[in-house]
Structure formats: structure tokens, C-alpha cells
Image (cartoon, grey):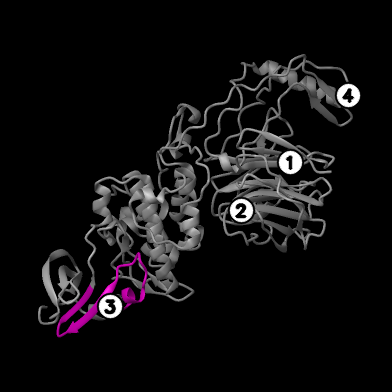
Amino acid sequence: MAAALPGYELGGELGSGTFGLVLAGRHRGLDRPVAIKILAAGHDGAAAEFTVEARLLASLDHPHVVRVYDLVETGDLQLIVMELLDGGTLTARHRKGMSPQEACAVGLAVSAALSCAHARGVLHRDIKPDNILFDAAGLLKVNDFGIAKIVDGSGATASQVVGTAAYMAPEQIQAGRLGPATDLYALGCVLYQLLTGRPPFAAAPSMHALWEQHLTTPPAPLAGIPTVLATVVLQALAKDPVDRPPSAHAFALDLASAAALVYGQGWTARTGIGLRLDDDIRAAADHPARRISMAPAAAAAGPGPHPADAGNVDGVPAIPRPAPHPVASGRPTVMASAGAAQVAGMPAAHALPWRRRLRRPWIAAPLAAVTVAALVAVTLAIAAAMRSGSATAVAVPSRPVPLGQPLTGSTNWITQVAFSRDGHTLIDADADNTVRRWDVTDRVYPTSLGQPLAGPTALILSAAFTSDGRTAVSGGADHTVRLWDMTDRTHPTRLVPLGRPLTGHTNWVLSVAFSPDGRTLASAGADHTVRLWNVADRLHPTPLGQPLTGHTDLVLSVAFSPDGHTLASGSQDHTVRLWNVADRTHPTPLGQPLTGHTDPVLSVAFSPDGHTLASGSQDHTVRLWRIR
């Protein structure tokens, strides 16, 4: 070795394995420390692979990939001279203790390295803590592309099962078709381990038993981790590669956005881990969004104190529980008329939109106990008054009362609910990637309408009905909008997504709304835009014009006016904007943004006559605007 590397001083052993060993060294002329990887003698056919590894590493010129300085082949020696990283491995750093913020920073750095490799058609195939190193300044670098595979755009089929069992994707175990999602699965395993202290699948009696868990067993919830963050990690651990993020870059955007929501502005600087990120990922990671309370993922697993009483989660202050809603004075009545009824003296129910989604405070004090018999009697009296058209006042309790039992079945939090126009169907958008349907014709005894509508690959954040009730729409964290045929509620097999998902948003779809005639759909996203879609042909929807831009932050809500000519949008930038959409292909802004709110605008709604707009904000206020 000394003869093969006359310009280097050789040092002690840094590590060893079946490939051979790694020695420390120093370049005499440059006074640069190096690591020298030596292929062990007797590896038939390994020399060519060793050369391929060196060339792969040399081609990946990225701050988060270990640099190669030289390849030396002489006689029986094959040597790769690489930069020496003396900050230790991720394994060693994790043993000393890592915060969740540091784990997220690791995920962003490794994603950046994988993006570079995947762009050159290179899969790593062995992402694990031992192959993730740090330099003395804390800059993370991915190492050991020894079993990397070069693929073309269509992916590659594994010629043999290679990798580390605890981090291998199902398709890798089955020697199936590999792609960027294979490396993302391994990264998901690493992040799961960093956040929970254990791999997603552990304590198996044999390697084959461990593989079986990767193939068939869902990973356990990430106890104590905010749900928005846990969801990003679990998506990378999907069994089917199609259900994982479409790229390492997309995964990094989701991870950066989730971490920014949980840990607030500047969280990356507090980790001590050097990061070299693309501009859009850096912006998402350091987003100046107001820190929001996040319920731990484990909170949904069983009984316990209400999240509002749980104190801080990962340093995020809890949202205080509000005071009980005041009850209107006087005797509440039900005023019935032909085909309509109004309950007076009851406060309206408000759905808390996406931006404050995970920790929802109680809306009112616990309701007074109501017996089943009394509840049924009140309901029957109201129904009788409505059927008869009588204006006779019917006494009802002075507070809203629960109708029957809660609708259950979702395995995660509910992001939005919507009624059909006739009031007989209710849908809820769930963070378990489904839309559930309920027959609520009988309010006391609602029933489920078949299996949940599945199809999105990430949590669903918004849902709405057309005015005729024949079509529902959902938008989610997979950046897509999907249409659902709701014509026949009783045959789940017919309730399938209509056409292909609507794509174009580059971040989460946070709000959706149909025009009154049901022919136009608006979608608002975390990419700061509102998009319009022609859905007159439900099987072949098309985009209308260019995205509506102007908001400088996430667009959290969108609504059409009753005549369908005006669109309103509310944003994280504290403003409301109005748009003239009479010409759907050439929408234009109307006037200046409406300012006054001091926090994100979470919801907007038009009055029935279209002359007034209401906006609700995280600043605890509702504002009314005359827009006639």
C-alpha cells in the first residue's frame, strides 16, 4: 500500500467488513486527512464493482455525499481515497441522544444526497445509520455506494437480494423492480428509528421473519411524535412503492413543511447539523409560519387527558381551552315552514380548518346529560312540526345536543366534513387517506355507506359536494385533487375516482370548492396558488387558465359567491383576496387584498345574497366585508 500511495502517510484502521477495510491517511503535499478503502484480496469479480463504486462516488458531486479523491489499481490492490469524516457515524451520534429536530435535519440532508444520486440514475440500496457520516463541523454525508445500482428511467430489477435487512424495502426483499422509492423506504426506516428509538420492525427471531414484517406488517404508530410529522415518515414506509413519495425531493418538501409547522422558524439552525438544501426546501424548512400545537400521534390510540390539557409537545405551546360558548337568552324555538326549519337560540357549529388541525380545543363546555328517551322525543317533535308546516313553537333544549352515537371508523383525525345539498349524505375527509360516507337521513341513527373511498396516497385535507350531490371532491397532501361519483350511494363498487387525479399543485391541497352550477372547481394549496378546473365533463376535467397568484403564503380557504362570478381566498399571509371568475379562462384580481386580520385567514364564506363576505382568522376574530 505504501508503494501504491507514495504521496500519502498511512494511519490506523477506521473500520472493516466483508469488502476489506478502511485506513486513515494524510496527503503529504496538501496536508489533507483522507480515508483509504481497500478491497480485500480473494473477492472474485469484486474488482470491477469496486471500480464502479469509485466512479459513482466521484460523479456525485454533492455536499451531502462523501467525496472521492483518487482511485488506485495496482497489482492485486484496489484502493479508493476518500475524504475523511471524523465526526463519527449516525449510529454513534444517535446513541448519544438526538432530538426530533435533529432527526428531521438528518432526513433533509439524506434526501438531498439521494436526489443527486437519483438524478444520475443511481440507487444507493443500503441507506442505514452506519452509512451516514458527519464531519467535524456537523455536515452530514452519505457514504458507501458499494452496492449501488445504475438504473434507467423505467427502474431496474434486482439481480439478487442485497442490502441490510432492517432497512430493506419490500420490493428489494422480493428481488423486484427497484426505483427511488426503494431508497426512500430505507430512509423512512432510519427516521422512524431516530424518532422512536427503535427500527419499525425489530426483535424478529430470524432474518426471514424480519423480512416478512417488512412485507406484510404495518409499522406501529410513532408514539409521542406530532401526527403531521409521523404521517410523512409513515408514507415513506408504504408497502407499495407507488404509495410512497414520488421522489426524494418531494419527500424532503413534505418533511421540511411538517417540521416547520411543528418546530417553528429557524429550527434547522438549532440542530447543529450542517445542511445544504435546494432553495424551495430551505424555504419550506424555515417557513415563517406561526408555530401551531400538534397532538402526539399516540394521543389517538387510547383514552387520556384532552390534548388541550396536555401542555407542550416538543416545545410547542398548547392552545388554551376556550370558555364555554354563551347560550342565547330566551326560549329557543323551532320555526317550521314549507320545506325548511330553523333552530333559534343555538350557536352555530364551526369546523376548524386545516391550519389548526391536529390539536382541536373543545368548542363548548361538556353538554348536560340527555337521556335517550328525551333525545328521541325532541327529534320526533321537530320532525312532526317540519312535516306539518306548522309554525307552532316546539321547545328544545337550551344547548345543542348530540344526535345518537359518534360516527366512528376513521383511524386518524378528521380534517373536514361536508353535507350533500339534500342533507341525506355526509362525507368526512380523513388523515388515514380515505373519504368516508354516511347516510344521515335519520339523524339519530346514521349508517355507513359501504367501504371508505380510497385512492389518495397521503392524508386528505379537504372535501366538498356539488350542489346536485352527484359528485364529491377531495384534496390532500399528495398534491392532487380527486373527483368521486356519488350518484348511487348504496353501491360502493360504483363509487370510484372519476378519471385521473387533477395534478398541478406542487404542495398540499388545503381547500376545495365547487361553483354553484357544479361545472367549475377551485382548489387552494400550500404552493400559494388557487387553481380552477373545468369539471363539466366529470370523467375528463381540465385546468382553466393560469393559476391565481398573489398570495405570499399558504392559501388556506376558498369559496365561490352564490352567482359563481366571484371567488374569495384566505391565506396564511393574513389577507383575503377576491377574484373575478366570470370568464373562467381569464380570471382577474378584484381590487386590493383585504387586510385587517393579524393572523392566518382560515375560512371565508359568502352570504346567500352575495353582498357580504365573512372571514375567520387564527387571530380569534371574524370580519365582515361589504363587497356588493
Mark 2 vs mark 3, CA separation in Å: 50 Å
* Residue at the (85%, 40%) spot, across then down: 609
Amino acid type for the residue under numbered disc 4: Ser
* Quarter the C terminus occupies: top right
Residue at image location 58% in from the left, 40% down from the top: 414
Note whether 523 is above or below 375 in the view shown. Answer: below
Residue position for label 1: 605
Q: Which mark is residue 552?
A: 2
* Secondary element type, mark 2: loop
The range drawn in magenta is: 54-81
- At label 1, the amino acid type is Ala
Counting from the top left corner in percent of width and height, residue 154 is at 49, 74
Residue 49: image tag: 3
Is residue 445 at all visible to an observer of this figure? yes
Mark 1 residue element? strand
Q: Are marks 1 and 4 in contact (CB under 8 Å)?
A: no
- Residue 193 seen anywhere in this rendered image of the structure: no
Residue 388 numbered tag: 4
